[in-house]
Every structure is written in C-alpha cells, then in structure tokens.
Image (cartoon, helix red, strand yellow):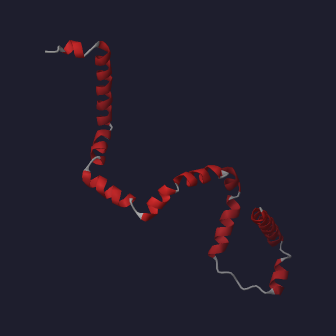
Amino acid sequence: MVKVETILTKERREALEKFLDMLVKMNELGLLDTIRDLLDPEFIGRLSELLMTPGTLKLLDHIDDLLDLAGSIDVEAIKGNMPVIKAALEALSREPKPVGITGLMRAMSDPDVQKGLGLMVELLKAIGKTKTK
C-alpha cells in the first residue's frame, strides 16, 4: 500500500492547497455554478442550435478575411469623420425634395453645398483611382 506522504510531497501539497484555494474563490464568485450550467447538455444543445445557422457557418468560413479587414480599418479616421457620417445618415432619413436645374444652380451658391460637392468630387476621384488599378 502506498503511503499518503509518498504521494503528497511538499510541492504537491502546496500546489493542491493553492488549487483548493482557487476553487473556493471561484465558488464564492459563482463561477463554478456558471461552469456547471455551461456544461448542461440542454444548454449545449440549445447553444449549438443557435450557432449552427447558415449565416454563422458562412461567417466562420470567412473569419480570417473579416479579421484582416477589421485590422485594416483606420479607427481614428472614422472617429474624425463621425460628424460627416452622422450628418449623412440624418440627411438620408429625410425625404428629399425634387430639385431641377434651377434649384441645383441656386443650391450651388450655398457654401455648405459647395463644401459637400467638393467632398463628393474627392470621394469620386478616390473611387475612380481604385477602379483603374
């Protein structure tokens, strides 16, 4: 018969005590209950039903590409252009009035329209450059 002292060396005893302390803390925080609930077969079945949709599977097929794309986004540029994005979304939510040639000519004297048109011209140039490559 193997003696307990042989199995529980000083190092193992210390490790076991630390592990048991961690378990007590996890229990106090409710983490053990959460882990038990996550391992429940009914929960796992429901979760797999929710995750195994065609859309989710397609997303997972392209996750590397999506992560590369997300990493290439210039967040600071987006933050800097938030006023433009918000103004555009607000304008899109309103019903536009029909504008003819005369209305367009009148609008061209508005400094805001001129700035917006300048922005659109720059945007169109940038898009055009990407299409010629």
**Residue at 83% of width from left, 74% of height from top?**
110
Left or right of 18, for residue 122: right
Furthest-left residue in this view: 1
Side of 44 relative to 88 (left or right): left
Q: Quadrant of the C terminus?
A: bottom right
Residue lying at 17% horizontally and 15% vertically, measured from the top left? 2
Front residue (pair 127, 18): 127
Image location of residue 98, percent across then percent down: 72, 86
Q: 63 or 116, which is in the foreground?
A: 63
Quadrant in the picture for the N terminus: top left
- Classify residue 51 by image quadrant: bottom left
> Across the whole image, how many numbered discs are drawn on residues?
0
User: Outermost residue, front direction?
Assistant: 133
Quadrant in the picture for residue 126: bottom right
User: Residue 46 at what x, y percent from top left?
Assistant: 31, 58
Q: Locate residue 82 relative to residue 61 in the image: left or right.
A: right
- In the rendered image, residue 34, in percent from the top left (x then y), is placed at 31, 44
The residue lying toward the viewer, choosing from 34 and 15, is: 15
Q: Is residue 122 above or below residue 73?
A: below
Q: Is residue 47 above or below residue 6?
A: below
* Residue 21 or residue 42, whichever sits in front: 42
x, y percentage for residue 56? Answer: 44, 60
Which residue: 48% across, 61% down? Answer: 58
Q: Is residue 128 above or below residue 104?
A: above
